[in-house]
Amino acid sequence: MEEIKITRAPTLKPKPDSSKLVFGKNMTDHMFIVDYDAGQGWHDPRIVPYGPLQIDPAAKVLHYAEEIFEGLKAYRTAQGKIQLFRPRDNIARLNNSAARLCLPQIPEELALAGITGLVKLERDWVPSEEGTSLYIRPFMIGLDAALGVHSSKHVQYIVVVCPVGAYYPEGLAPVKIYVEDEDVRAVKGGTGMAKTGGNYAASLRAGDRAEKQGYSQVLWLDGVHRKYIEEVGAMNVMFKVGGTILTPDLNGSVLDGITRRSCIQLLQDWGYEVEQRRISYEELFQAAGDGTLEEAWGTGTAAVVSPIGELAMGGKKVTVSHNQIGPVTQKLYDNLTGIQWGRLADPHHWVMPLD
Ligand SMILES: *Cc1c(COP(=O)(O)O)cnc(C)c1O
């Protein structure tokens, strides 16, 4: 691998107050960029001062959403060390998304070196207050400057990072979820299994509508039958019904979440049966009605787990777990965050120390 060339920012920004961080707003002083050109491969890895990109107005990413991304975090332990959580899983998923979008595969070591090189340079930006972390956003964009619909021959992989606050500064609070019965996020054969910007563009309208009605997230149903549960907002979703854990299977339109994967492993370690299968909204409302729906939660890197306290669809509304965080949701949160911040043992070797 070519050595990463570092150009330092001439002046450094003041660090924000880590008790007042707004998600995704406080970008650091530097960013990582590596170019790809067909026939040449990946070249010129570099860390440069953070700043606007110069993009040709005809670049494919601006017109045809030729874009994929990832999201992971660097955590500071009580001993002051910095560690990542399953970063190789993120890179494998980035390459799966790349295959779907006809973007080039990036070697794992290069993608990882971009992340670790940047986080090491920005190590003073990794906050140490309870629940805070450095959010890492790797992404890949197609940059060919021509309006024809083709896959790009010139591509960049870029990494930017920003400190983020505790997701729940006042403790884990249950969220209200609206079951979306009009718009769909993704369909099998589409790009639902890829982490790509277009999926999010398609989700904005339902998200806005739900917010106006006082709901914080949308529960997506499948695009064909409009019946089976897929995901909640930008999270995977799990339910505890009559002692068993249910979660939608990875059917092609659901994202393969790394938090989902980690939760399934922990739940199985604890002896729970985890069923990955189709779950209809009727089954869910039925379980809520007969009292067997014990807990519901979303899973994702940003929030880790997000308890669901209320589900609404059409005129129907049900409360889950008395609008309180349930014991399994809490246990998952405590164990995953315990591993991520280095407070608990890491039996599955998920953590990668940075130094
Ligand atoms: C990123 C993402 C998730 C969560 O994945 P994690 O790897 O757990 O962060 C779930 N659903 C969608 C649509 C996503 O984009």
Image (cartoon, rainbow, N blue to C red):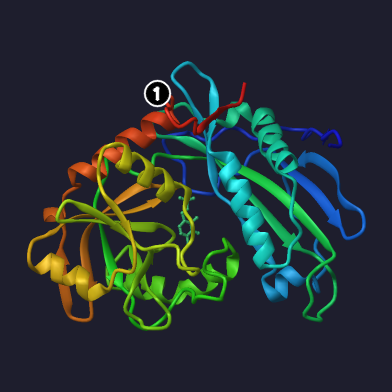
Q: Is residue 113 above or below residue 150?
A: above
Which one is nearer the viewer's eye here, 239 or 179? 239
Which one is nearer the viewer's eye here, 350 or 340? 350
Where is residue 2? Give x, y as percent.
Answer: 86, 37
Q: Is residue 137 visible?
A: no
Q: Which image quadrant: the N terminus?
A: top right
* Location of residue 251 by image quarter: bottom left
- Residue at horizontal 36%, vertical 47%? 264
Q: Mark 1 Cα within 10 Å, few/some/many (few <14, many 20+)?
A: few
- Residue at horizontal 49%, vertical 34%? 350
Q: Is residue 217 above or below residue 156?
A: below
- Residue at horizontal 37%, vertical 36%? 336
* Location of residue 237 by image quarter: bottom left
| SS under mark 1 | loop
Q: Which image quadrant: the C terminus?
A: top right
Left/right placement of residue 125 relative to residue 296 reads right
Where is residue 312? Give x, y as percent.
Answer: 22, 71
Residue farthest to the right, as pictured: 39
Q: Is mark 1 within 8 Å of ligand 1?
A: no
Where is residue 156? Give x, y as percent.
Answer: 78, 55
Residue farthest to the left, as pictured: 290
Which one is nearer the viewer's eye here, 206 or 352? 352
Q: Identify residue for label 1.
A: 345
Left/right placement of residue 211 relative to residue 191 reads left
Number of marks drawn: 1
Where is residue 205? Give x, y as percent.
Answer: 44, 76
- Residue at horizontal 33%, vertical 76%? 180
Q: Is residue 86 above or below residue 25?
A: above
Identify which amino acid the numbered label 1 is placed on: Ala
Q: Is residue 62 visible?
A: yes
